[in-house]
Image (cartoon, helix red, strand yellow):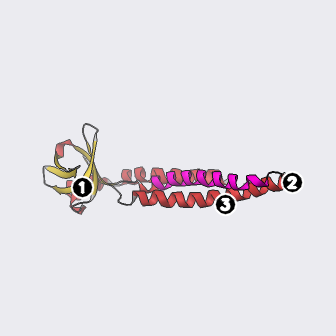
Amino acid sequence: MSSAKWVVGIVGMALLDPALMLAKDSNLKSWQNLTQLAVGQEIEITKTTGKPLRGAFICFTEHSISLREKQREIAILRTEVVRVQLRPSDRHKCLWIGAAIGAGAGAGVGLGIGQGVANESGGDFRNLKPAITTVSAVLGALVGAGIGSAFGGRHTTIYIAP
């Protein structure tokens, strides 16, 4: 199997994994799952209107859930809640780690390509080696940031309306 197919397979599994886990877990339909939330945790609530609300968890009762969004407290009736998800606190950290790993890998690949171009041209294009390395590092950083964002941006589902 070529390395490109291998990478596509790994990325595909990483993106599908949350959906597969969700399909397996039927315990998500219990409103009491919200007891695992701590005050101040970042959550996202999807309402029946489809519009998500993001903010810091405050509390929940048998009939509603409350969060703080942009300096205002919002209470949402349980009947209007479709899903409650815990938002990852280290989203940006994963993005930057992915960018750094991608930049390093891209620079390594670019260095190899630049060396190959310099050798094949008999030294005529030796001065392009830094440019090739830089462009490869930038492209690698972008790809790495995208992958890091995908891994770090996963939300953990706490509750789904029955």
Residue 117 tag number = none
User: Could you tell me residue 78's position as x and y percent?
Assistant: 17, 46
Quick one: which residue is furthest to the right in this view? 122
- Front residue of this view, candidates 161 and 69: 69
Q: Residues within 10 Å of mark 2 (few under 14, many from 20)?
A: few
Q: Looking at the picture, which amino acid does disc 2 mark?
A: Gly
Which-is-in-front pick, marks 3 and 2? Answer: 2
Label 1 element class = strand
Give the residue drawn at x 37%, y 52%: 22
Residue 122 is labelled as 2
The quarter of the rendered structure image containing the N terminus is: bottom right
For label 1, count other residues whose C-alpha is less than 10 Å away and answer few (under 14), some (14-19) or many (20+): many
Q: Choose between 106 and 153: the one closer to the eye.
A: 106
Whether residue 93 is visible here, answered yes or no, is: yes
Query: What x and y, as percent, mark residue 97?
Result: 49, 61
Task: Specify few, some or many for label 3: CA neighbours under 10 Å numbering under 14, 14-19, or 20 or more.
Answer: some
Which of the 4 quarters of the picture holds residue 103? Answer: bottom right
Q: Which residues are magenta?
A: 123-150
Which residue appears farthest toward the front when viewing the image? 127
Residue under pointer 1: 56
Report how far apart the C-alphas of labels 1 and 2 lie in the structure.
Answer: 62 Å
Kindly identify the amino acid type of the residue bearing the numbered disc 1: Ala
